Image (spheres, coloured by chain):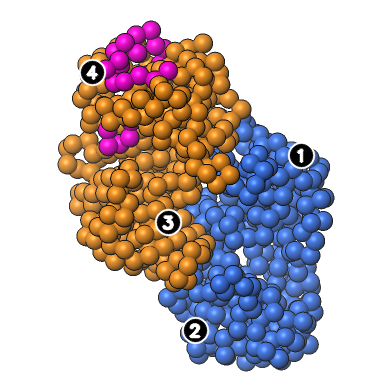
Chain colours: A blue, B orange
Amino acid sequence: MAIITIIGSGMMGSAMAFPACRNGNTVRLVGSPLDRAIIEHGQKTHEHLTLTHDVNGVKTCFMMPEKVTFHYYEELDECMKGADLLICGISSFGLDWFCENVVPRIPEELPVLSITKGMIDNGEGKGNLISYPEHMLKFTDKKLKINAVGGPCTSYELADLDPTEVTFCGPDMEQLRWIRSLFETDFYHVSLSTDIRGVECAVALKNAYALGVSLAIGLSYKREGRVFEHYNSQAALFGQAAKEMYRLLNLCDGNAEKNIFLGVGDLYVTVFGGRTRKIGTLLGEGKKFDEAMEILKGVTLESIVIARRTADAVIQMVEAGRAKAEDFPLLYHIRELLVDNADVNVPWSKFETETIR
Amino acid sequence: MAIITIIGSGMMGSAMAFPACRNGNTVRLVGSPLDRAIIEHGQKTHEHLTLTHDVNGVKTCFMMPEKVTFHYYEELDECMKGADLLICGISSFGLDWFCENVVPRIPEELPVLSITKGMIDNGEGKGNLISYPEHMLKFTDKKLKINAVGGPCTSYELADLDPTEVTFCGPDMEQLRWIRSLFETDFYHVSLSTDIRGVECAVALKNAYALGVSLAIGLSYKREGRVFEHYNSQAALFGQAAKEMYRLLNLCDGNAEKNIFLGVGDLYVTVFGGRTRKIGTLLGEGKKFDEAMEILKGVTLESIVIARRTADAVIQMVEAGRAKAEDFPLLYHIRELLVDNADVNVPWSKFETETIR
């Protein structure tokens, strides 16, 4: 039985306690400085304040597994002592904070598993994206082993024990197998890959593209004048999204042929289960980006950050002659929406191709 | 303006009249011998008896475009005279009938566009699948040009003018461009491909796999005891389905890298918009295949035919040493359900992989 310390007690980080504790491990859940209310509520009630599910129509907090203890951020160093694994459970918005404040303090022998999904510009201004684990390593001289989780998994469904299939990626297959042994259960299935770049790229991209697919939901609502979905248009955007993700994986050295399947699974779950759906739907209904963000005030929307970052990277790659703008019509339109506050006008005919066998 | 004759007045064949007539073409809709009620109703009311949509919660027959005329099967030869294009609008169940009764009568100079999607064993008993257009050509000595439509498109949403992106495939790019010019509208977007095998294979496979993805819907209903979906499990099955489809495309000489995106788009729309969802959900809820079919009596389920046919072909390919059974755990399970009346027991752990970069 292992001791697992989770830093960041948001929804996804906390949900990892469910498979971990099912396997008899102990979990120390440490809030970030922004998570004080979650820790306070957890210490009092053992419930999770923000990780909720629908119980017969009523939004209900999850009771956390018995072997979880709740800790304020000040106890982080104490909580890393004797731990076998550290989970980085922060969102993309906390990445800088994590890199500056936590990474330097992680003991060299403590393996890390990051649930934060994303890619970030490598800082050279050429549109080269690297994975978060690669980025994190820049903030320490220690030889940390930073693994990450990719693949479709929404937090509240994991806590609900819905069967889930994810991929752990990291530099060392032996270590990956050991980490899997801590989490693998009948509801949490784990593939392994040493292709960190490819896995992270695949799952990061879905954030941008889930917004793109969701535009069709809003367009349908608007045309119907009611909450009513059409799927032809969603499917057209889904297929185009998959195609552009495949191209981006190739551009990011992400082994497209292997990792696109992770990407489409993750895209699927994000269109249905994620917060990104809300913003895409509002944009599709005809709201400007500014208005939509005002309506969703207070909701964490990593997708926006990732979408902008990906689009910026692609533009830089196009400028450098490494990519063709016409290969990414959907991403360019998403960028127009987010950056230029443009109206939705899906470039359907730009998706058309002619293929000679 | 062209004259387009549609043979088979089921939902999908008939829906093609909407983009065709929007472009000013004339449509002669000819029922198969099974479609007499549709033709009778159409001649009386100009409504389509079975092509319906939801209008504020009420199931309502579509009014067909003005330039559609309705014809009984006996008028087929008359209706092909002077026509510029023949649409084959029958389902897979009518394929034998169409090949034996219609194909030999098609004038050599009349191009065909088939909306019937599928692959069929080439008859050599080695699991080699060929596309329907390839199969149809076996029933005539004439040099017919048989084109086909692939890509995500449900009939009632096309009739509803929801934006749709499809692919026309055929042997001659010039002819494909002309056919596109008859249908391309602001709601019907068309890519072109001379890769008939690849396009048809991609869109045929989704029938089998949409059933696989839908199992998760039923499993969720069952576990919750109510109509409530979880998406992690659907996404896991969706990703696995895409992976197996990619492998099958390669085995069928189907240019996986180009056509998988058609396949995933079509899979998406079929999970949401199709009849296949119903049977998958019932199986997931714990019904045996026999019971599920009894419940759905009277519903046309091409997916079952295609799923069995695909699984049979894969088994033959495995026996011939051309494919590995462990590459298709989901398809094998679908086959167990359909052929052996087995209980649902999704082989989640067989989906797990280890990838060394």
Q: Residue at x 65, y 54 (%)?
A: A277
At label 1, the amino acid type is Asp
Assign a secondary structure to mark 3.
helix
Query: How many C-alpha atoms fall within 10 Å of the one at disc 3: few (<14), some, or many (≥20)?
Result: many
Residue A98, horizontal then vertical, whole percent: 75, 73
Callout 2 touching callout 4 (CB < 8 Å):
no
Toward the top, the furthest residue is B82
Left or right of residue B184, residue B135 in this image:
left
In the rendered structure, which segment of residues is drawn in magenta?
A: B69-94
At label 4, the amino acid type is Pro
Provide the residue designation for mark 4.
B104
Provide the residue designation for mark 3.
B213
Q: Residue at x 38, y 63 (%)?
A: B284
Cα–Cα span, label 4 and label 1 = 52 Å
Residue A179, horizontal then vertical, whole percent: 52, 78
In front: A94, or B29? B29
Q: Which mark is residue A343?
A: 1
Q: Quadrant of residue B300?
A: top left
Question: Which chain does the residue under circle 3 lie in?
Answer: B
Question: Which chain does the residue under circle 4 lie in?
Answer: B
Left or right of residue A230, residue B284 in this image:
left
Cα–Cα span, label 3 and label 1 = 34 Å
Question: Which chain does the residue under circle 1 lie in?
Answer: A
